[in-house]
Amino acid sequence: MNSTNIWKKRSNDKSEKKSNRILNRHNFKSKKKKLYFNLLKDNLITNWIENEDDEESQSSIDLEIFYKKSQININDQDEDSLQLDNVQRLSTMKHIIFLDLENFSRFFQHLTNQLPDHTYVMAFQASNIQWRPPKNDIVYDNLLNLNNFQLMRPSGNRHDAADFALVLTFGKLHGLLPKSIPFTIISGDKGFIEVIHQLKNSHRRINWFNPHQFSYENFNQILNISSTSSLNL
């Protein structure tokens, strides 16, 4: 009996490649441009196309409607709950980072300067891994003082539990927050590339990059960190 191969390779359609163009490629200057761009192509992916004439989203949050429909207990202070006041605060941010602590626990040690203003970091970890916050780290301490860092409640200890928690939270916030706020996933796990594929036609700028393949300098360039960023301690 002849068997039929039902698995087909993903199409290499040029239009799909165009929608996953590398973020701000023209902003990176290197003596070995071809090698550097190849590095970016494999480890930095975005759904955003520069100079695209898309109208800005007028998305907004109707907190009254959300309050009536939400099943979240606003008295519950669980770290991973999307509280009403937290969602309202997130809507004022200019960039939200989803950090995979299992894959990149030394995020703050790689930062040489402050994150841009109104950047919010949400960190995810499994219950069988205990992340140790950096001590005497000026960037981390500044985010805490600004209330711009959230360590989510540890997820299960099964394989990819933290990844699922990250994606679920990502999806919730994608539906609740204005599309003008960029989302960035920082992880060496290439499974997150599927988020880009699923939302490639979204009006939101969505980025993923593999931090393990970049130098400290390039890592900070990608996050748009300026050496003149002011501290708010």
Image (cartoon, helix red, strand yellow):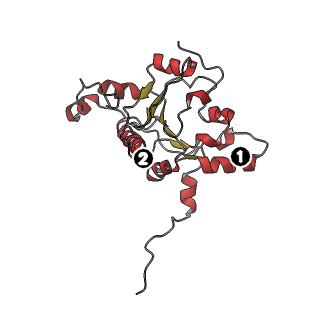
Give the secondary structure at mark 1: helix
Q: Residue furthest front?
A: 128
Q: Are marks 1 and 2 in contact (CB under 8 Å)?
A: no
Q: Is residue 77 above or below residue 178?
A: above
Query: Residue 27 in the image: x percent, y percent?
Result: 68, 38
Query: Residue 210 in the image: x percent, y percent?
Result: 58, 43
Query: Which residue bears the numbered disc 2?
Result: 160
Of callouts 1 and 2, the N-terminal one: 1
Q: Give the residue displayed 41% in from the left and 47% down from the top.
A: 159
Q: Amino acid at mark 1?
A: Tyr
Query: Residue 126 in the image: x percent, y percent?
Result: 41, 38
Q: Give the residue displayed 54% in from the left and 52% down from the top.
A: 19
- Mark in the foreground, 1 or 2: 2
The one of 21 and 231 positioned closer to us in this rendering: 231
Q: Amino acid at mark 2?
A: Asp
- Side of 148 relative to 50 (left or right): left
Q: Give the residue displayed 24% in from the left and 28% down from the top.
A: 64
Q: Is residue 181 above or below residue 1?
A: above
Crowding at mark 1 (Cα within 10 Å: few <14, some 14-19, many 20+): some
Query: Residue 228 in the image: x percent, y percent?
Result: 65, 20
Give the secondary structure at mark 2: loop
Quadrant (top left/top right/bottom left/bottom right) for the N terminus: bottom left
Report the number of numbered marks. 2
Crowding at mark 2 (Cα within 10 Å: few <14, some 14-19, many 20+): some
Q: Which mark is residue 36?
A: 1
- Side of 198 relative to 217 (left or right): left
